[in-house]
Each structure stands twice: as C-alpha cells, then as structure tokens.
Image (cartoon, rainbow, N blue to C red):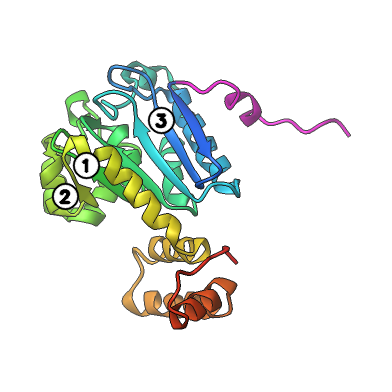
C-alpha cells in the first residue's frame, strides 16, 4: 500500500504570519501572531492556526496555551482581499478553523492589546480567558464591508453579552474599549499595559497548579452545556464529577488537603 499523505503535512512546514514556542519545562506553549504592524491574519494562516492548536492539544508536554501577538496590536483582522479570492468551500470552513481554541481540551489564554478586530476578536472569543488593557479595542467591523462576522463572532458575543449589546457592536461596527469589555464580561482581566506580561504569566502559573484532568473535564463540560437546559447541564455535571471521583488526581487532592500540603497532580 502506498504511503498515506495529508495536506496538513505541508501546511505546518512554514507558518504564515505567526510562530510557536513550547516550554516543556513549564508546560506552556505560546502561539504568537507576528505580521507587523497590525498582524493581519491571512486565509492560509487560519488553516495553520487550526492545525497548530490541534497539534498542541495532542502534545503531552503542553498544559496551557497562550495566544498573543508581537507589537502594539493583537490583530486588525483578516486579509480583506483574501475573501474575494477564496472559494465558497474554503470560506465555509473559516468558523471551524477559528473555533480551534474552543475545541482544544487545554486552557487557552488570549492576550489582547491594541486593535483586536474581526477575526482577531473572533479567535479571542473562542479562547477560555481574555486579558485586556487600557489600549485594547474590540470590534466586529464587517458591516463596513457589506458583510457580517463569519467566524463565530456575533454568535459567541451574543452568548456572552446578550442580543442588545451584540446588535450595538455588530450592526454599528462599534468599538469596545478594554475596560468596557471587562465590565460587560467579555474579558477575564483588565490590567494596565505595563502589567500585561506579568498578568499573563500569573494566570498561566495559576492554571498549571490545577489537575490537568480536572481542567480538561471542566472546559469540556462548560462548553458542552453552554446551550443546554439546566436539568441536562446538572445531569452532565454529575456524570463528570462521578468519573473524576475515581481519578488519581482527586485522591491526591484529598490526601494533600488532609495532609496540609500542596498537591502534586499527574493528570490521571
């Protein structure tokens, strides 16, 4: 039988507009947008970002993933010309690619400074945590192009802030400053720009303390029950709790609690 091949092999050989670093010692991986000055996200880059998140999800050395950018802006959005050149089939996959951080079983932190527009905002919304500063501006400006958000932006935002505020942002292409995003519940933390790196490091360290198994379980449960009824959500929560009840990490947590010591979780 001939050797199996997949297009993904070629797509990961040369990353377009971003790079990845993995610190196996700490369990942290950084996905860094690097197309200055505005870190525009190309069509090819969307495919690659999905593949990178899938790869990091399977990497046992990685516990927490940080999505950040070089320079003063996270991303001003996508490559506008690329939309006209892409086929309808390709465009139909955009939302699936940008949802990769949400599907990833590990915690993902978006570090958002400066412009965070269009797909830059959408991929941040697909992350689990968003840290913003006094420079951050969120926006879904597609109405200015005669379009609507196409990678989950309006849908995820409406889940977070409700239909009234989402219409205000989407239908008016309105920009939301970092402080307001925090007040609305879009952002997890609001810090001065000078403290952004320290706040990111602190959150990573905090997440690394917990059981990776319990973290993965909590993320999947919360994602899966986001649009479930209360009774279904409680039922699923009970099943997840029951499964963790027999885990090594839960036993370690209980023994550490009674022994008045810090737990050493192993992820099983």
**Cβ atoms under marks 1 and 2 closer than 8 Å:** yes
Q: Quadrant of residue 133?
A: top left
Residue located 60% across and 46% down the image: 59
Measuring from the top left, give residue 87's x and y in whole percent.
46, 24
Q: Quadrant of residue 169?
A: top left
Image spot of residue 162 (x, y percent): 17, 56
- Seen at 29% across and 42% down, the residue is 198
Circle 3 SS class: strand
Badge 3 crowding class, 10 Å Cα cut-off, few under 14, some 14 to 19, many 20 or more, is some
Q: Quadrant of the C terminus?
A: bottom right
Residue that badge 3 annotates: 32
Residue 23 appears at what percent x and percent y?
52, 39
Residue at left 21%, top 42%? 132
| Rendered image: mark on residue 182 | 2
Q: Considering the numbered disc 2 on the image, is that residue within a helix, a strand or a loop?
A: helix
The secondary structure that most of the magenta stretch takes on is loop
Of the residues under marks 3 and 1, which one precedes in the sequence?
3
Residue 152 to residue 88: above or below: below
**Disc marking residue 132:** 1
The answer for how far apart the CA atoms under marks 2 and 3 are is: 23 Å
In whole angstroms, how far apart are the C-alphas of marks 3 and 1? 16 Å
Residue 3 belongs to magenta span: yes
Q: Residue furthest right?
A: 1
SS under mark 1: strand
Q: Earlier in the sequence, mark 2 or mark 3?
A: 3
- Per the rendering, the mark at residue 215 is none
- The boundaries of the magenta stretch are 1-16
* Residue 137 seen in render: no
Q: Is residue 71 left or right of residue 17?
A: left
């Amino acid at each position: 039988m001939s050797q199996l091949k997949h297009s993904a092999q070629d797509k990961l050989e040369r990353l377009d507009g971003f790079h990845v670093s993995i610190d196996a010692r700490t369990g942290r991986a950084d996905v860094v947008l690097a197309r200055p000055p505005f870190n525009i996200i190309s069509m090819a880059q969307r495919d690659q970002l999905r593949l990178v998140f899938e790869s990091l999800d399977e990497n046992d050395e990685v516990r927490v993933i940080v999505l950040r950018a070089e320079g003063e802006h996270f991303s001003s959005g996508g490559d506008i010309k690329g939309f006209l050149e892409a086929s309808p089939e390709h465009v139909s996959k955009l939302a699936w690619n940008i949802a990769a951080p949400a599907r990833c079983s590990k915690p993902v932190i978006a570090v958002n400074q400066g412009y965070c527009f269009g797909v830059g905002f959408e991929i941040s919304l697909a992350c689990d945590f968003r840290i913003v500063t006094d420079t951050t501006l969120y926006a879904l400006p597609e109405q200015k192009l005669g379009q609507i958000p196409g990678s989950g932006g309006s849908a995820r935002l409406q889940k977070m802030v409700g239909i009234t505020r989402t219409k205000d942002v989407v239908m008016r292409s309105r920009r939301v400053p970092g402080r307001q995003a925090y007040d609305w519940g879009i952002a997890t933390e609001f810090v001065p720009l000078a403290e952004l790196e320290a706040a990111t490091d602190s959150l990573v360290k905090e997440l690394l303390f917990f059981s990776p198994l319990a973290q993965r379980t909590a993320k999947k449960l919360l994602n899966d029950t986001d649009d479930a009824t209360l009774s279904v959500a409680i039922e699923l929560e009970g099943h997840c709790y029951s499964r963790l009840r027999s885990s090594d990490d839960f036993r370690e947590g209980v023994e550490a609690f009674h022994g008045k010591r810090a737990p050493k979780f192993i992820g099983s």
